[in-house]
Image (cartoon, rainbow, N blue to C red):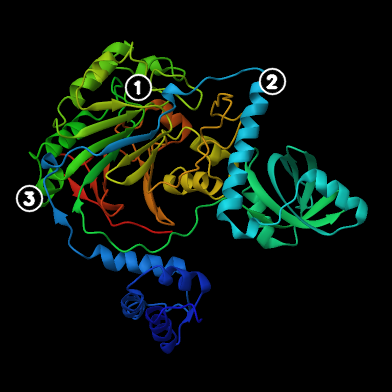
Amino acid sequence: MNSMTSELRRAIAKILSTGLQISPDAVDALARRKDAFEVACKVIEKIGTLDEKPIVLTAELLFKLIQEEEAKREEEVIDAEKIPVDEEVIFDPTQVINPDGSSEGFISYFLSRYQKIKKILLRERFDVRNTITISQIKKWAQRGRGVVKIVCMVTDKRKTAGGKILLELEDPTGSIRAVVNEKDPNVLSKAEKVIRDEVLCIEGQLVGDIIIVSDIIQPEIPIPSIRARESKPRILAALISDLHVGSKYFMRSAFNRFLLWINGRLGVEKYRKLARQVKYLIIAGDIVDGIGVYPGQEKELLVRDIKKQYKMAAEYLAQIPGHIRIIIIPGNHDTTRQALPSPAIFRDYAEAIYKLPNVRVLGDPAYIKLHGALLLVTHGRSLDDILTTTPGVRYDRPAEVMIELLRRRHVAPVYGGRTQIAPEKEDYLVIDKIPDIFHAGHLHTFGYLNYRGVIVVNSGAWQEQTDYMKSMGIKPDPGKVTLVDLANKKVHALLDFARERSIEMLSSLNTL
């Protein structure tokens, strides 16, 4: 308490005077603000408007309430045409990938994954301190030692008839078995979501040479600190994906409405004002429908030449105003290496795209910094594996599926599933940098969430339901555009172009 500033003491006293309790992490978050007392007053006022009043003020709740309050402030609005491009590619796999298909290459890949995620766990999780190796556990077992904690990779998972979950675990020093008791519902719930090949922390009681699990700790995304809002002009990035140009089901009319809007020629003034603020267009893959991607695809193609598909796509993108920077990564329908990480779309097939002066083509995944906001963009093909291995997630709630990648801090955690992964010497798919915005597509369903300060967007598609989708039970949610404000790192607006001759503004941002 003696180290507290008078400002922080006043803030805590104000909160406690209302009958609220305050958690230690909320105290830490307030301590980072010079205006802690003002923040406390605003939070108390905001809580007073809630139907269900909290008992404890946590850092997560504090962050949410402050963000909502500060979002009400009017940002400075400047036409994007007057703002210079501020773009930095932090990571593009195109120039660094060099797979090694030998057994040594696979060992190097998984060792890199383990070491990178272990580093994240030890750096960001206070509850992952004092871990030991599996080889040390074997020595402890001989001495009869009890509670152990290890960082490990899950190599197998099985469920017994009695409801127990059995895990096979490895680290560079050895392997060990672990058991999750069916009578411990909290740990059992966590174990249900554990998938093969993910790296996490296991804590438990050593009984013989088996760990009886008492906790499972994923790398996760830390709860963000509360940052004072900076006064910057609003700069918007439009997020879309899965155009599938060349398909009979490409939604030309809806995309043409989008092009009219972004050129300021569609909608009432409030929509045209939004269009003038767009500086970037980020496309998360599947620019074209491709050739031979799935059985019977040729029956659903309008254009059966891949170069002509890219030429047609370029004709659409050429109508985007020249001051808007277009950033494109590949999807599984594009011409690129199908194994992740994927290089940029092959230029030999997509020369028409590369010739556009305002286009930048990157690989998958890509980290890009735009006006200080860090974006992680991936097509999202690994979301298929998450959907088949993780209970509780659904196709029609794609942002929640993406959050499972953030929790595991990996773009494609499942090896040997539907997603091909190349055995690079370094695992470039680990999410070692926490993005402000996480953007993907692939599932053709639309969703967005704010997860622990990260804007998570799955941008849907521009393709109607195909016969193949019907056979797979996929109901697309197409024609959506998400506009994110790079200045305050929030979703600013959601637009729907699927309706004939109109634009619809969708609802506001959800938060987890």
Residue pushed farthest front? 3
The residue singled out by tag 2 in the image is: 103
**Label 3 crowding class (10 Å Cα cut-off): few <14, some 14-19, many 20+?**
few
327 with respect to 323 (left or right): right
Q: Earlier in the sequence, mark 3 or mark 2?
A: 2
Q: Which circle, 3 or 2, is nearer the viewer?
A: 2
Q: Gap in Å between the C-alphas at discs 3 and 2? A: 61 Å
- SS class, disc 2: helix
- Mark 1 belongs to which amino acid? Asp
Between 86 and 188, the one nearer to me in the picture: 86
Q: Choose mark 1 or mark 3, whichever is in front.
A: 3
Q: Is residue 210 above or below residue 512?
A: above
Position of 492 with respect to 119 (left or right) is: left
- Sequence-first tag of 1 and 2: 2
**Label 2 near label 3: C-beta < 8 Å?**
no
In-front residue for pair 481/97: 97
Residue that appears at 59% across and 24% down:
423
Query: Separation of disc 1 and disc 3 at Cα?
Result: 35 Å
Q: Position of residue 289 (x, y in %)?
A: 35, 22
Q: Amino acid at mark 3?
A: Glu
Helix, strand or loop status at disc 3 = helix
Q: Which residue is mark 1?
A: 289
Instruction: Give 268 or 300, whichever is nearer the viewer.
Output: 268
Q: Which mark is residue 269?
A: 3
